């Protein structure tokens, strides 16, 4: 499957080239992703569709640097990242990638605002006041400015998901 769009590499935030991924299942080697190519441009939204077992989750785990590839190369923000060690991969994940899972995984004891602040606080990106200001702006973007003091059990399912989106941003 080829998805090339011959664009200037400066617009490309993520590029996967000839990605191969294998899994062992009951003694059989399964070739899950075969020479997959994909480019994602800055600001672009991408949907990944396919049948159950077609490799969608595997592809997302590879794109999120949660899983290693068996062949090919990955670039994020013009940096080849497929051969980095675990510490370097974690650094890239912390600075360039955000995850929104099917389940929100919010911390029940914290407010919406605190849940959005957690990743930046853990990584010491900025001082607490700056982090709080940016978290409030993100919650406003997702339409939850009036719900920042609410804990997850006080939010609807959709609101929880939007908190998770703000946290990923």
Image (tube, grey):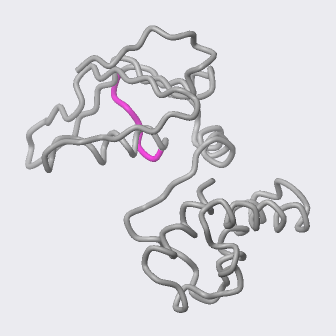
The spot of residue 46 in percent (x, y) is: 40, 37
Q: Which residues are magenta?
A: 66-71
Where is 95 relative to 43, above or below?
A: below
- Which residue occupies the foreground of this view, 109 or 73? 109
Residue at the image point whose x is 24% and y is 42% from the top: 49
The spot of residue 129 in percent (x, y) is: 91, 67
The spot of residue 95 in percent (x, y) is: 69, 44
Residue at the image point whose x is 34% and y is 24% from the top: 19
| Residue 83 is at least partly visible in this image | no
Residue at the image point whose x is 47% and y is 71% from the top: 104
| Quadrant that contains the N terminus | top left
Residue at the image point whose x is 55% and y is 85% from the top: 152
Residue 32, quarter of picture = top left
- Which residue occupies the foreground of this view, 138 or 90? 138
The spot of residue 137 in percent (x, y) is: 75, 61
| Residue 87 is at least partly visible in this image | yes
52 is within the stretch colored magenta: no
Q: Is residue 25 left or right of residue 123?
A: left
Where is 58 relative to 72, above or below?
A: below
- Which residue occupies the foreground of this view, 33 or 149? 149
């Amino acid at each position: 499957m080829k998805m090339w769009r011959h664009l200037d590499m400066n617009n490309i935030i993520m590029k996967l080239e000839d990605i191969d991924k294998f899994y062992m299942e009951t003694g059989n080697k399964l070739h899950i992703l075969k020479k997959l190519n994909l480019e994602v441009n800055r600001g672009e939204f991408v949907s990944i569709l396919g049948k159950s077992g077609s490799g969608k989750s595997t592809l997302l785990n590879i794109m999120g640097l949660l899983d290693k590839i068996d062949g090919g190369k990955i670039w994020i923000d013009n940096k080849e990242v497929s051969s980095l060690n675990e510490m370097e991969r974690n650094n890239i994940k912390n600075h360039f990638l955000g995850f929104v899972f099917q389940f929100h995984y919010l911390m029940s004891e914290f407010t919406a605002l605190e849940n959005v602040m957690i990743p930046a606080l853990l990584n010491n990106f900025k001082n607490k006041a700056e982090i709080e200001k940016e978290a409030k702006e993100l919650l406003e973007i997702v339409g939850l400015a009036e719900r920042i003091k609410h804990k997850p059990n006080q939010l609807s399912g959709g609101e929880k998901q939007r908190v998770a989106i703000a946290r990923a941003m």
